[in-house]
């Protein structure tokens, strides 16, 4: 335990911090380690103000017995250190215990690792769906006559002229139980009762796919437009069937565009916020939503910065993976 002089210094420092409006910041910092520290500091300040003592090592424990607990002083010592890795650990559901060892947080308090995995899973799903939808559309745009291709390309570009919030809100209207989609399915006799298309993963995937699809189409189309049809005709003239020629001759030439589109859609999806917030449920929170909560509601910029740091690291890692697989840094848009 500390010497009596430390108790006296603490009592005077608490009063001075309260007078200079710095006590709240100190209490928030200490609450990161122990949620009861804020109430302890405020209670102690109320009792200490205007009071004198010959031995604060006796007076403070009389005010609250936690001042006689060594763990309280350990918390003060840890909070006085700077910089620390506490927020970086908390962003991965770990913390430093009273002995200084790094341990996992209890299961009921572990939310960030699951959010990272959920974010990666949703982003990968949206990327795959966009690829399956965009590839045939891009091929059609690249092989149609110029005038028809321009008209169809206009339909791809038009969504960029509409606000992201408006597009997401439109799906909010379309997907509700009594919305257009369920009414159409019921009118066709395909369903007997409305499908649950909102506040779940289905709504998130539909909304994000609609918004991300143009990025995938443009990336793949830019590469397909530069591929000469001579290659397919040459492969078929040498005896390859149309499907074989397409798979072995055409698709390999489009991998740069596929890689660029997948990387672009995946990275944009990693940091997505509006669509999951409006169309998703409690189990569909992405890491961007948790960052927003820390900055706007909890005002915990340290933890928000740690989460953002890992998000940037993940983005760099996936760029390296995509680049190794398809060489997207060599892509030339034509």
Image (spheres, rainbow, N blue to C red):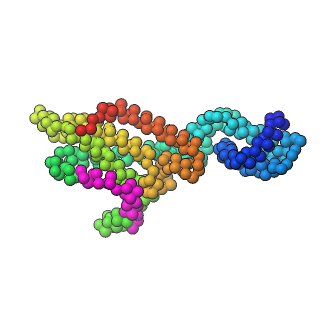
Residue 218 in which image quadrant: top left
Write the residue at 27% across / 35% down. Answer: 332
Residue 84 in which image quadrant: top right
Write the residue at 57% across / 38% down. Answer: 88
Residue lying at the far left of the rendered structure: 237
Residue 97 in percent (x, y) is at 67, 37
The answer to whether residue 149 is above or below residue 234 is below
The answer to whether residue 241 is above or below residue 170 is above
Camera-nearest residue between 278 and 159: 159
In the displayed structure image, the side of residue 103 where residue 322 appears, left or right? left
Query: Can residue 99 be found in the magenta stretch?
Result: no
Camera-nearest residue between 183 and 316: 316
State which region is magenta: 153-178
Residue 144 in percent (x, y) is at 17, 48
Q: Give the number of callouts.
A: 0
The answer to whether residue 65 is above or below residue 164 is above
Camera-nearest residue between 277 and 191: 277
Residue 304 in which image quadrant: top right
- Predominant SS of the magenta segment: helix
Is residue 323 in view? yes
Residue 282 in percent (x, y) is at 50, 55
Residue 35 in percent (x, y) is at 68, 47
In the displayed structure image, the side of residue 7 where residue 281 appears, left or right? left
State which quarter of the image contains the N terminus. top right
Write the residue at 80% across / 37% down. Answer: 6
Query: Can residue 166 be found in the magenta stretch?
Result: yes
Is residue 93 in view? no
In the displayed structure image, the side of residue 250 where residue 310 appears, left or right? right
């Amino acid at each position: 335990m500390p010497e009596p002089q430390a108790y006296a210094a603490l009592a005077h420092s608490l009063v001075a911090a309260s007078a200079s409006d710095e006590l709240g910041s100190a209490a928030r910092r200490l609450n990161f380690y122990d949620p009861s520290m804020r109430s302890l500091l405020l209670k102690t300040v109320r009792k200490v103000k205007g009071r004198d003592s010959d031995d604060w090592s006796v007076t403070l424990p009389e005010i609250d017995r936690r001042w006689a607990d060594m763990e309280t002083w350990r918390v003060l010592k840890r909070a006085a250190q700077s910089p620390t890795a506490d927020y970086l650990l908390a962003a991965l559901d770990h913390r430093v215990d009273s002995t200084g060892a790094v341990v996992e947080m209890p299961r009921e308090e572990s939310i960030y690792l699951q959010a990272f995995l959920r974010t990666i899973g949703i982003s990968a799903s949206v990327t795959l769906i966009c690829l399956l939808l965009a590839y045939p559309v891009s091929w059609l745009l690249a092989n149609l006559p110029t005038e028809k291709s321009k008209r169809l390309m206009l339909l791809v570009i038009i969504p960029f002229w509409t606000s992201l919030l408006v597009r997401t809100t439109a799906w909010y209207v379309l997907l509700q139980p009594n919305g257009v989609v369920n009414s159409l399915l019921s009118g066709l006799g395909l369903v007997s009762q409305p499908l649950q298309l909102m506040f779940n993963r289905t709504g998130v995937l539909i909304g994000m796919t609609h918004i991300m699809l143009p990025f995938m189409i443009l990336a793949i189309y830019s590469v397909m437009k530069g591929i000469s049809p001579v290659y397919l005709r040459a492969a078929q003239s040498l005896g390859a069937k149309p499907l074989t020629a397409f798979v072995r001759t055409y698709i390999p030439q489009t991998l740069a565009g596929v890689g660029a589109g997948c990387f672009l859609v995946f990275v944009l999806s990693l940091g997505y916020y509006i669509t999951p917030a409006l169309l998703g449920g409690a189990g569909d929170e992405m890491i961007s939503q948790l960052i927003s909560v820390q900055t706007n509601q909890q005002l915990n910029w340290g933890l928000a910065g740690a989460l953002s740091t890992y998000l940037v690291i993940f983005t760099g890692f996936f760029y390296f993976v995509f680049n190794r697989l398809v060489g997207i840094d060599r892509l030339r848009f034509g």
